[in-house]
Amino acid sequence: MKHSVCVSAVEVLYVLVCACAGIAAVILSSNKNMSPVQVLQVMLHYSIGDTISFLSLSDTHRLITPNLVAAMPPANSTSQ
């Protein structure tokens, strides 16, 4: 018996938001005085680029999908 998985865009967005919130929480735990912009800058600085294969996406989605993957900064680097 085959099972198919149908994941909606809302479900994917929810998972992404939760993952980003978790990373932001870890960053803030080491420096509670960071502004939201500073947290975003740290997240963008440590994100890993050019890792997503766009072959399965339509041309429209390729243009609006950032080619970044969130990554945790090293434990001693979040206080930049």
Image: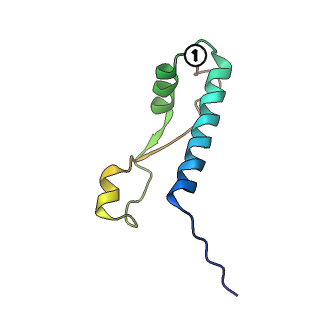
Give the camera-side residue of 57 and 4.
Answer: 4
Q: Quadrant of residue 18?
A: top right
For this view, does 29 lie left or right of residue 36?
Answer: right
Q: Quadrant of the N terminus?
A: bottom right
Residue situated in front as seen by the camera: 13 or 77: 13
Q: Residue at x 60, y 49 (%)?
A: 15
Quadrant of the image occupied by residue 7:
bottom right
Q: Residue at x 52, y 24 (%)?
A: 39
Q: Is residue 51 above or below residue 29?
A: below
User: Please, which residue is most extreme toward the right here?
Assistant: 1
Give the structural element (helix, strand or loop) at label 1. loop
The residue indicated by pointer 1 is: 79
Residue at the bottom extreme of this rendering: 1
Q: Residues within 10 Å of mark 1 (few under 14, many from 20)?
A: some
Q: Position of residue 24 (x, y in %)?
A: 59, 30
Left or right of 50? Residue 27 is right
Confirm whether residue 11 shows in the render.
Answer: yes
Residue at 64%, 36% (x, y): give it.
22
Number of numbered markers? 1
Residue 52 image offset from top left, x and y in percent: 44, 54
Asked if residue 74 can be seen in this view, the reply is no
Q: Could you say which quadrant of the image residue 29 lies in?
A: top right
Give the residue at the far top of this rendering: 33
Vertical placement of residue 73 versus 7, above or below: above
The amino acid marked with disc number 1 is: Ser
Up-down: is 61 above or below 73?
A: below
